[in-house]
Amino acid sequence: MTRRRNPRNSVIRLTTGHAARTLNHPFARREPVLALDFGATSVLVTTSGPVTVENLEFARRLAREASRFARSIERSFYSLPDGQGVAA
């Protein structure tokens, strides 16, 4: 992880579980929206106008970090005592 230049003002923690889901809404006539739903809380990720190079770069970084997150979860899942992702 790179070091932040500015301190965080606040942190919102959204944990995954049975109610968590992700949805991509690729609208034909407007900017796409990525929805991250956590039960009663939703986070919508979109652009502030027409898509720019910066938006594309952010989307690629987001996808890369999400992939790294998934690999970390997989490592944790399969390293549980029974090797099948179930705590003994």
Image (cartoon, rainbow, N blue to C red):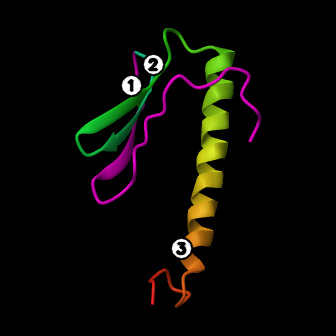
Q: Residue at x 49, y 8 (%)?
A: 49
- Can you give x and y, in whole percent of width and height, for residue 61 in the image? 67, 35
Residue range (magenta):
1-29
Q: CB atoms at circles 2 and 1 under 8 Å apart?
A: yes
Which disc, if any, is residue 31? 2
Residue 21: x and y in percent read 35, 49
Which amino acid type corresponds to the residue marked 1 in the rendered image?
Phe
Classed neighbour count for the residue bearing mark 2: other residues with Cα under 10 Å, few (<14), some (14–19), many (≥20): some
Where, quadrant-wise, is the N terminus in this rendering?
top right
Q: What amino acid is found at the position of numbered circle 2 in the picture?
A: Glu
Q: Residue furthest left?
A: 40
**Residue 28 drawn in magenta:** yes
Query: Is 85 rendered above or below residue 11?
Result: below
Residue linked to disc 3? 77
* Type of amino acid under label 3: Phe
Mark 1: few/some/many CA within 10 Å (<14, 14-19, 20+): few
Q: Secondary structure at mark 2?
A: loop
Q: Secondary structure at mark 3?
A: helix
Q: Residue at x 56, y 15 (%)?
A: 51
Q: What is the x, y in percent for residue 43?
A: 38, 32
* 60 vs 54: above or below: below
Q: Which residue is mark 1?
A: 27
Left or right: residue 2 compared with residue 54:
right
Q: Which mark is residue 35?
A: none
For image coordinates 58% across by 71% down, the residue present is 76
Of callouts 3 and 2, the N-terminal one: 2
Mark positioned earlier in the residue sequence (3 or 1): 1
Q: Is residue 22 magenta?
A: yes
- Give the residue drawn at x 29%, y 60%: 18
Callout 3 crowding tier (Cα within 10 Å): few <14, some 14–19, many ≥20 = some
Q: Quadrant of residue 25?
A: top left
**Rendered-image quadrant of the C terminus:** bottom left
